[in-house]
Image: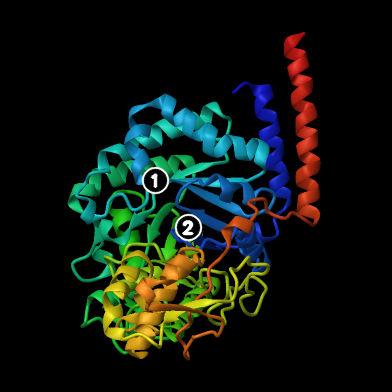
Amino acid sequence: MAAGAALPALLLLAAAALCTGPADAALGVNWGTMSAHRAPPSVVVDLMRANRIGKVKLFDADPSVLRALAGSGIQVMVGVTNGELSTLAGSAAAADAWVAQNVSRYVGRGGVDIRYIAVGNEPFLTSYQNQFQSYIIPVMTNLQQSLVKANLASYVKLVVPCNADAYESASVPSQGVFRTELTQIMTEIASFLSSSGAPFVVNIYPFLSLYQNADFPQDYAFFEGSTHPLVDGPNTYYNAFDGNFDTLVSALAKIGYGQLPITIGEIGWPTDGAPSANLTAAMVFNQGLINHITSNKGTPLRPGVPPADVYLFGLLDEEQKSVLPGNFERHWGIFSFDGQAKYPLNLGLGNPVLKSAKEVPYLPSRWCIANPARNLDGASDHMKLACSMADCTTLYYGGSCYGIGQKGNVSYAFNSYYQQQKQDPKSCDFDGHGMITYLDPSMGECRFLVGIDDRKSSDVASCSGPCCAVFWGTTALAFWVFMYFRMMVSA
């Protein structure tokens, strides 16, 4: 990009820097979109702004999401998917095109405050069997060169979100080391991050430690203190987060980068789909985490130094996520799929509790249930089919709809499929075993959802307030500066 053409982008970045309201917050959220009930991006952006959430981590670079974030003042991390790594590793031209398509055009013309590009998503997971490992450094090299060409390298930083299984310890945090096969690449990544001023990004999940290990002390997963603290020489650990974090600090120190800033890319607690996944536990964990982070106490190995940023996982429930790890995978949101707050939570950003989304374009208030005039025995195969297509995870042990009876199970499955199909009347037939009702069949904590009508949604975010005035005013200024340089070059 020529110097004159880069000026509009840089002016817009300067304008974004003026709107520092929510963008100064250290707490952010992960916004995943694996759902058949996607709230309009503009509604989700308004939801984040209402809750003063100033940072968002995306798993790709969805154009509709990025358009909605324009002028919002929210700092954004876009993602290179694991499926894109091989192409970007093997072609500098492909990297140039990716940056132009997913970064430059939004920063320069769309007004999105993109701060980070995530290179892959947990690419070193042991379950991936090293299939992505050889791509990471070439992708980072190519993308960095592309950012330099676009005059964005000083503003947009590359990071690699890693799962906590990238490092390990024999027993205590001070013995933390990276997995043997990752030592070399982690050293290269840490060197790259240190030279560019970017943090090491790691995902930490105390819930999974508790879920996967029957002997894991439950109180150690939370932040209220533990009857089973971990003693490591002069340091004592009372919660799993601090212990995991300092294990990474130790691992980084052993490769020569013990002072590298650390960002928590994902952390949270699910609300359904397992006995330990419920509203109360999620509220206690997330509030404890937020209080712990905002106290600036740090950890025993980094006292007084909290993580650079912390991104809660996640913003919304995603009912199309894989359930291979467990049924809880679809229930990580602090908000339900439609942006409704699940429980009281003070994010420490100015609001005492979460504010729910407004102007959600729901489908009509009607549901599909089991036809009371038909024998339920004939509905079992239809229920299995419905659950293979739609989400029935709340019906199983540990779920909020567990124990509602055979009729309730069939009705819930039928309705999940019916809503997924946007209330197509034919999708509630099930050979006569289904029936449409206008009476809400929800029972206690078991909620029968009504889907979202995405045909009525708009991908353009509403923009108001002083930040928008600065944004659009600077856009006009950038345009005329660009035209001036163009005329000068032509002359």
Position of the C terminus by quadrant: top right
| Quadrant, the N terminus | top right
How many neighbours does mark 1 have within 10 angstroms: few (below 14), some (14-19), or many (20 or more)? some
Query: Residue sitting at 44 percent across and 61 percent down?
Result: 264
Quarter residue 270 falls in? bottom left
Q: In the rendered structure, find residue 33 and report the number of the disc placed on it.
A: 2
Q: Which of marks 1 and 2 is nearer the N terminus?
A: 2
Answer yes or no: is residue 116 visible: yes
Where does label 1 land, which residue? 81
Instruction: Report which quarter residue 151 is drawn in.
Output: top right
Label 2 Cα crowd, 10 Å radius (few <14 / some 14-19 / many 20+): many
Under mark 1, the amino acid is Thr
x and y percentages locating residue 406 in the rendered image: 32, 87
In this view, the residue in front, 48 or 491, is 48
Badge 2 marks a residue whose secondary structure is: loop
Q: Which residue is drawn at 66% across and 48% down?
A: 70
Label 1, secondary structure: give it.
Answer: loop
457 w.r.t. 91: above or below: below
Q: Which of 226 and 491 is in front in this view?
A: 491
Image spot of residue 380 (x, y percent): 27, 78
Residue 26: mark in rendering: none
Residue farthest to the top?
Answer: 491
Say whether residue 66 is left or right of residue 392: right
Q: Residue at x 48, y 28 (%)?
A: 96
**Residue closer to the observer: 99 or 435:** 435
Does residue 232 show up? no
Q: In this view, does 491 lie to the left or right of 189?
A: right
